[in-house]
Image: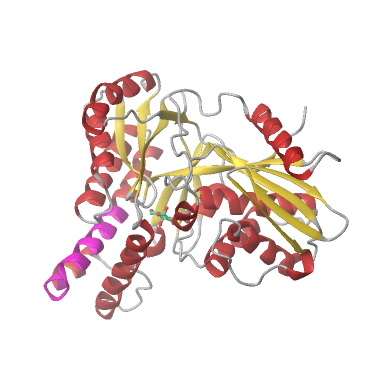
Amino acid sequence: MLVLAMELRHDMRGLKTRAATPLGLEAALEGHARAFSDRFGSGAPPRLFFSPGRVNLMGAHLDYNGGQVIPMAIDRGTFLALRPRSDGRVLLASTWSPEAFEWHGDALPGTALGQWVDYPLGVLLGFAQRTERLAGLELLFGGNLPIGAGLSSSASLTVGTAYALDLTYATGLTALDRVRLALEAERNFVGVQCGIMDPFAVGLAREGHLLMLDCKDETYEHLPLDPEQTVVGVADTGVRRELAQTEFNRRVGECRAAFDALRVHCPGATCLRDIPPEVLRRHEADLPADIVKRARHVLDEVARTGSARRALLAGDTQTFGAMMTAAHESLRDLYEVSVPELDHLVEIASGCPSVLGARLTGAGFGGCVVFLVRAGGERELADCIASAYPQRFGLLPDVAFFRGDRGPREIARR
Ligand code: GLA
């Protein structure tokens, strides 16, 4: 996601204060089919696919520390239009840039090009290797997810590509196979050492549910979120930090350093999540201050995420929301990945009676705040933001509300 964010610079303010997909997916995908004909010419109509983005509600920066995370797929994401070709050529293009890429299916580049196309290309290579079924095709990407906003545009794209290939070539992959193809593409081909949360959140989504994923053993469960009671809102600050990728990698390195220093006191620990908080307390004087702060965030967030899960299962959304806001404070003060725009949105939300909790989502360094809101309080939240945010930052972030999406799917043509 972060690399992609740096590659692509276009309008990020895609989120509006209204239903998530005002046109409806079918109509939006019809528009995408027209863009496909403009790009690749008329002929047989392409098959159309949708793949969601995600917000993370709990478990901030825990996936690469083996912790538990609670994301939710959203009904905004990547559009794919795919048409097979009989000459073995592979053509990839997108609606967000004028370039198109073309190779023979037997001669796909084996190393990344440093462009957005690396994401689907990595999936194509993995798919070809695994199934030996890849043939010629034309594939156009587009969508309605702001890129680089922390809503996982990259996993939306890679999982969506695996899904579209699987259906087109009838290879019968499981949802988990497609998640693995996406993950391997991003890690091994694009070269981003991302955690496992994003492709799992997209590929294993269930409508009206959050996903509780244990990133240590990859077990998961779906937690219901009743839309009659609570809705999830997202506001995009529009802020994108140049250093986001470097800082993200630095945090991954700091957590690794904390684990390496503390594991000697905890035989059997395989990741930072396994370190008992009292071991950190006992040894913190031996560690650099920054490393202590990062580790403390991780271990506190592990405990908060467990509490949030229990609260949700007991129908206590108030406690779940309180855990989200506490997570934000820790991301601001201990993990140091927030920016003033995100902090201000969370502060505004704290004074808004309908909001149960708020925190930055994704890696941080800009991007979006996610809110847990009492159903019916959507307008109140939008008004709270409109009356306080522009005074300080001079613009009004749009707010969108989502229900848990059901994951990648083919969209039937009318
Ligand atoms: C980014 C990464 C995720 C996760 C989050 C932080 O979004 O892509 O894997 O690490 O940051 O929770």
Residue nearer the viewer, 263 or 313: 263
Q: What x and y, as percent, mark residue 338?
A: 27, 48
Residue 30, placed above or below residue 305:
above
- Displayed quadrant of residue 27: top right
- Displayed quadrant of residue 348: top left
Q: Residue at x 50, y 60 (%)?
A: 218
Q: How does the figure colour the protein chain or chains?
A: secondary structure
Image position of 218 (left or right of 242):
right
Residue nearer the viewer, 414 or 148: 148
Q: What x and y, as percent, mark residue 360?
A: 33, 43
Give, as a single range, the part of the protein colored magenta. 283-302
Q: Is residue 300 magenta?
A: yes
Q: What x and y, as percent, mark residue 124?
A: 69, 61
Q: Residue at x 61, y 71 (%)?
A: 111
Residue nearer the viewer, 316 or 7: 7
Q: Is residue 164 magenta?
A: no
Residue extending farthest to the front is 98
**Res. 124 visible in picture:** yes
